[in-house]
Amino acid sequence: MLSLLQTHRYWPGSELAERLGVSPRTLRRDIDRLRELGYPVEAQRGVDGGYQLAAGASLPPLVVDDEEAVALTVGLQTAAQSSVDGIAESSVRVLAKVVQVMPARLRRRVDALRAMTVPATWPGASAPRIDPGLLTTIALACRDSERLRFGYTDAGGRESEREVEPLRLVPLGRQWYLVAYDLTRHAWRNFRIDRISGPRGTGARFRPRELPTGDAAEFVRSSLGALPQPYEVEVVVDVPAAVARERIGRWGTVEEVDEGRCRVRMTTASLDWPALALGSLCAEFRVVGPPELRDQLREWAGRFSRA
């Protein structure tokens, strides 16, 4: 019943009793029991009456299912790496409490995810959503040194079946990677998790090989070294600095040049954002750098003209 009350904001009494398979009298008794335990359950009287959880003076225990617990752990782990004051320490404390009260079967999954993940940082765009179950399946194979099979789609859209010796999961920016030894290509590889499908353990154990780099995070960074580095954008715009700060200040820094002009600087992995920001100013501007931004604007201008 508590799980149902946490799922929906409001439950009609008859519908809640039917879902639980109990009588209205039993339902009322259980509601009273929840209140005794500290859950602020509000009741609406009448024929169409029902129940809902309200905000209380203190936080009572919550009910979460397996996948929600995994999602909670991933979020707390990410927060534990935060640079915001107070967030990291609090997240570690909560993470310890959550893992402590988990059933053994679920703690094994969560411990695997935490132990087999190496944090790293990289500026870049956001990534697609990842299924927590997929992450935990891979993490368990990493922890248990069990060979893993899965389908993989590369950057060119080509699909293949892979068998690997998984080593570590690495969250880089907002993307996840698996560092593993590819048994078909006989080489170390990193695999983007959102391109993996149907991961499954083979039951075959292996002795972990030695990475050619210091750790898994360093291996992923070096493997992705060919990716475009963030652009340092500098543009002089014919608007007062105050106007630019109000409209696009959240995307970069604005410095006053004179009364009617300002200098805008941005650091970005994609030149689409500076183009959008500059267009929103509705003013003349001059690109100081990089040259790629000039090419981007010419390409956009041609497309807009053809439209």
Image: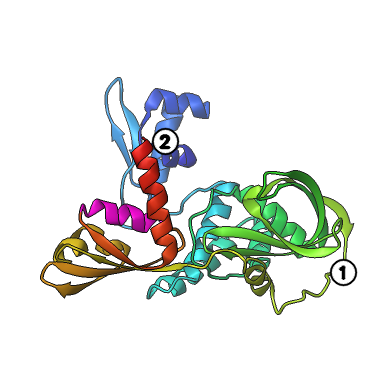
Relative vertical location of residue 23 with respect to residue 232 in this rendering, above or below: above
Neighbour tally class for label 1: few under 14, some 14-19, many 20 plus, Cα within 10 Å: few
Q: Where residue 207 is drawn, which disc sits there?
A: 1
Task: Give the left or right position of residue 121, taking residue 237 as reference.
Answer: right
Q: Where does residue 299 sit, x and y in percent of width and height?
A: 42, 49
Secondary element at image label 1: loop
| Residue toward you, 218 or 25 | 218
Q: Amino acid at mark 2?
A: Arg
Task: Give the left or right position of residue 25, taking residue 44 as reference.
Answer: right
Instruction: Report the residue marked by disc 2.
Output: 29
Q: Amino acid at mark 1?
A: Arg
What range of the chain is rendered magenta? 271-282
Q: CA distance from mark 2 to mark 1?
A: 57 Å
Task: Give the left or right position of residue 73, taking residue 4 as reference.
Answer: right
Secondary element at image label 2: helix
Neighbour tally class for label 2: few under 14, some 14-19, many 20 plus, Cα within 10 Å: few
Please name the residue shown 86% across and 62% down the image: 186
| Residue toward you, 306 or 71 | 306
Task: Give the left or right position of residue 123, taking residue 277 as reference.
Answer: right
Please name the residue shown 46% across and 62% down the image: 269
Please name the residue shown 76% across and 62% down the image: 180
* Residue 277 within the segment the image draws in magenta: yes
The quarter in which the C terminus is drawn is: top left
